[in-house]
Amino acid sequence: MPAVADLIGARPDKRAEFVFSTQKGTTPFSGFSKAKVALDKTINAVREEAGLKPIPDWRLHDLRRTARSLMSRAGVTSDIAERVLGHVLPGVRGVYDRHGYIEEKRDALTRLGALMERILEPPADNVVELAPKARTVSRSR
């Protein structure tokens, strides 16, 4: 996942428990509302510069839903995709299966990242120009 590693950057303290933190890795990131407002402002500035309308209303949860759907598309099993999102499996499996699934989650996120790259930057040889469809004249009887 080089793209994610580039976004995150080098962690000054490899022992830090949390990658996304405002307290040097000692506590998880918080302040999502403020971050969402700042993100929307940045996105809309980029869109305005590109001559696009402001981004339609969206929620952070939309990212989770999209990630879950794309993991299915990338061939990630449902159990692993749910665990990647931090969901606990119900019933006996959720109680007794205490394996961390670290490698499986890493694979799921690698697949997700690869699919997102293909969507955002499709290979040039993947584009085929289609001939315009011939117009047909309808005749009324």
Image: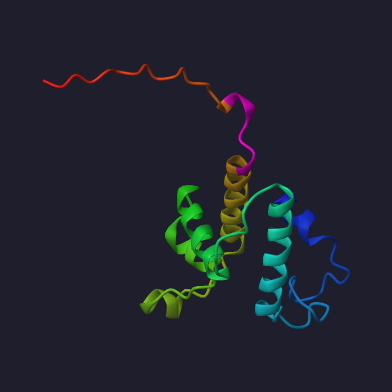
Name the residue rendered at 43%, 73% in the picture: 89
On the image, the x and y values in percent for residue 75 come to 47, 48
Nearer the observer, 40 or 72: 40
Q: Is residue 42 above or below residue 126?
A: below
Q: Give the residue at the far right of this rendering.
A: 12
On the image, the x and y values in percent for residue 56 come to 55, 61
Q: Would you identify the image quadrant in which residue 136 lies? A: top left
Nearer the observer, 111 or 45: 45
On the image, the x and y values in percent for residue 132 come to 44, 19
Picture quarter with the C terminus = top left
Name the residue rendered at 37%, 16% in the picture: 134
On the image, the x and y values in percent for residue 29 come to 71, 78
Whether residue 111 appears in magenta in the rendering, the answer is no
Name the residue rendered at 71%, 66% in the picture: 41
Q: Would you identify the image quadrant in which residue 32 lies? A: bottom right
Q: Give the residue at the far front of this rendering.
A: 140
Nearer the observer, 116 or 106: 116
Look at the image and give the residue range highlighted in magenta. Answer: 120-125
Nearer the observer, 98 or 140: 140
Name the residue rendered at 70%, 74% in the picture: 35
Relative placement, left or right, of 113 versus 13 is left
Relative placement, left or right, of 35 versus 132 is right
User: How many badges with numbers are in the image?
Assistant: 0
Whether residue 123 appears in magenta in the rendering, the answer is yes
Q: Would you identify the image quadrant in which residue 57 lies? A: bottom right
Q: Is residue 135 above or below residue 114?
A: above
Q: Is residue 43 above or below residue 49?
A: below
Relative placement, left or right, of 133 versus 119 is left
